[in-house]
Image: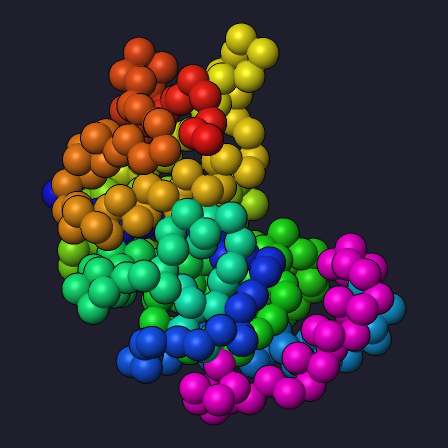
Amino acid sequence: MSILIVLSPAKSLDYESELAVSRHTLPDHVPAARELVDILRAYTPAQVSGLMDISDALAQLNVARYESFSDTFTTTNARQALLAFNGDVYEGLDAGTLDTPGLDYAQKHLRILSGLYGILRPLDLMQPYRLEMGTRLPNARGKDLYAFWKGVIAPELNTLLDKRGSVLVNLASEEYFKAVDTKQLKVPVITPVFEDLKAGKYKIISFYAKRARGLMARHAIDNRISNADDLKAFNREGYAFVPAASTDTTWVFRRDGVPA
């Protein structure tokens, strides 16, 4: 069985560092992104701040981004999504060190869910933005972004999985995976869970869990994994699969201490 992995995006972006990769693709849902940007352009900085619960400075920055959004994506105004996101997940994935075969695998087997773009391939050019999936932005399709993307993301995943295999690996956050209408999916979903020992109990610790999602995505890339069961061998930074704590669809990985 082949796999398709979904990740969340990150709030932090990197559009400054030098890139060794020039190859790129274009997002599939630019008209939909434009529709959302046009809605957001009607918001004042104060309204954006309230809508997204962000600082005035961030609101001003993103209002400027909406104003400068272009339907033409180039390496001047955009950057490959996998190399633009810069949060905990992407530090674990460390995409900047991927070689060409690794990028090829990622482009086929990895997708990034996005509040603005819906779904992105790793090498899709992405203009900088801030629009979390949980944002309650009224639009023509409903009251929020879940309503906006509901009829888009799951059918696209079905199409991809029909071509490549039959397992969807959910390494996205709960906020973002809610955008996938699982009732529409025609394939099983496996959700890895990462727990750390704290005060004598195994718990999900957000920072470490995010990093572990990136580490597992990188593990899949480095090992060119096509069978989901092979993910059970994931052991980076001290994690190990725990069969007794797992189910067919929720795979639990634990570690007893954070590596120095």
Image point 33% across, 76% down: which residue? 20
Counting labels gives 0
Residue most extreme to the right: 46
Colour approach in the figure: rainbow
Q: Which residues are magenta?
A: 50-78
Q: Is 42 on the left-hand or right-hand side of 112?
A: right
Image point 46% across, 31% down: which residue? 260
Q: Is 79 on the left-hand or right-hand side of 51?
A: left
Question: For residue 110: magenta?
Answer: no
On the rendered image, what quadrant is the N terminus found in? top left
Give x and y (percent) for residue 206. 56, 35
Give x and y (percent) for residue 165. 16, 50
Give x and y (percent) for residue 17. 49, 73
Give x and y (percent) for residue 75. 43, 86
Front residue (pair 147, 70): 70
Q: Quadrant of residue 82?
A: bottom left
Q: Is 73 on the left-hand or right-hand side of 155?
A: right
Q: Is 85 on the left-hand or right-hand side of 244?
A: right
Image point 49% across, 17% down: which residue? 197
Front residue (pair 156, 172): 172
Q: Quadrant of residue 234?
A: top left
Q: Is residue 37 above or below residue 107?
A: below
Image point 31% across, 24% down: which residue? 240
Taking the image as drawn, is residue 150 in sight? no
